[in-house]
Amino acid sequence: MKPVIRSVGTIFGLIRAEYRQLHNRYAGTIERFDGSAKEITTQIRERLWQGDFYRTSLGHYDFFWMRDFGTVAESLVHLGEKDKVQHTLHWALGHYRRADTITLCIDQAGHTFNAPAKRSIDALPWLLHSLVVSHYALNQAERHFLNKQLIKYIKAYLHPLTGELQRVSYAEMRDAVHYDRSAYSIALIARMAKCVQQLHLTGFPFHPQIYQAELMHNYWNGRYFKADRSSDAYSSDSALMPFFLDVINDSHLVNKTCNYVTKAKFSSVYPLQYGEKDREFKHRIGMGPILMPNYTGTTIWTWHATFYLHILKRFKRPEYTAQYDKFAELIERHGTYPELVNPDGSWYYVPIYRADPGMVWAALFEEL
């Protein structure tokens, strides 16, 4: 009976998410906030907390998204919201344990599901990362559950003896394309391996150094960490995440990457262009260049912009102030924190999709 109940909950969660997207696309409005960029992001962060968990946006993503929350968990802690981060994690763990699985999304009713409807390689790594940065105290039942999920994770994605990522299908940050084992995925597994050590879990025997070496051997091309094993293209998720998560902490490599971003003019108007050579990749059904043109091509993604700004600041890059000011101007231009915009900074809006406003990613900028 439990599998049936879980399946019904998954279907219900997906239907509700799609309904919200359709409603906001054609009938929803974009709320503008007054003030400076910092004041706008503070207002958004405060609105996304409604007493039980952090929503992902003020638009159609009004549910919990493990990936998005994971990227902002540390920023929220630094902004003084540690209790709310831990409360969100306790809420999420409760629903995950009841469903006996870790999915990318949970709606307000507690239905667990993946969006798109495909298992996610990064939900568990972002969960463990969030537990570490918030100093969450795991109880025995939660530890048992997480160790069991780690064993399942290895069976689903990794070689059981070496820990090498296998060529299998899964969802990840750049969910519009089918990657061949992205550098982003390797960085997340490396971070998870480190978190397993810090949380004293026992279900994952592979060391972070395995994946650090993998990044350097198979992904570093002398200028940046390339998108995946089959392409030499730049993609911001893969190029930046090893540095953002401190999986690779080499200033020489950071400088090479940032110099490439500048030379390629990926941040010339606003930071930061998603990537290049978008048509080289196989796109997921409904997310390709016909129905969603340029969705993860030369569009400006505010998520990656803040990863980029954090890296510039951490490594004391000279372009940090100018890039910060340009991004602040983009936030003030729209009076909110957009999901993505066109290369000229205008709102991304195509017949089947409209970029969402008020993203929880605003916390990343607010922390700077």
Image (cartoon, rainbow, N blue to C red):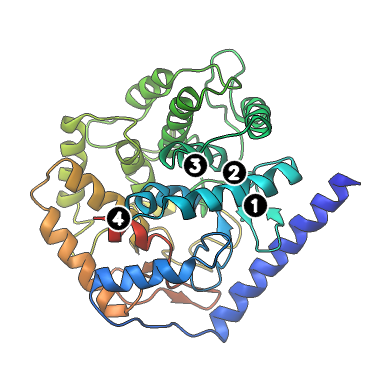
The residue carrying mark 3 is 126
Q: Check residue 120 in the rendering and tell me which mark sits there, or answer none.
A: 2
Residue depicted at 16% across the width and 51% down the height: 262
Mark 4 residue type = Thr
Mark 3 residue type = Trp
* Lower position in the chain sequence, tag 2 or tag 3: 2
* Lower position in the chain sequence, tag 1 or tag 2: 1
Mark 2 residue type = Ser
Few, some or many residues within 10 Å of mark 3 (<14, 14–19, 20+): many
* Lower position in the chain sequence, tag 3 or tag 4: 3
Q: Check residue 114 in the rendering and tell me which mark sits there, or answer none.
A: 1
SS for tag 1? loop
Q: CA distance from mark 3 to mark 4?
A: 17 Å
Q: CA distance from mark 2 to mark 3?
A: 11 Å
- Of badges 2 and 3, the one in the foreground is 3
The residue carrying mark 4 is 306
Q: Residue 267 location, x and y as percent?
A: 21, 58
Q: Residue 253 location, x and y as percent?
A: 21, 32
Q: Residue 100 location, x and y as percent?
A: 74, 40
Mark 4 vs 1: CB contact within 8 A: no
Residue depicted at 56% across the width and 71% down the height: 60
Quarter of the image for residue 303 reads bottom left
Q: CA distance from mark 4 to mark 1?
A: 25 Å
Mark 1 vs 2: CB contact within 8 A: yes
Residue in the foreground of this view, choosing between 102 and 140: 140
Q: Quadrant of the C terminus?
A: bottom left
Q: CA distance from mark 2 to mark 4?
A: 23 Å
Quarter of the image for residue 106 reads bottom right
Q: CA distance from mark 3 to mark 1?
A: 14 Å
Mark 2 vs 3: CB contact within 8 A: no
Mark 3 vs 1: CB contact within 8 A: no
* Lower position in the chain sequence, tag 3 or tag 1: 1
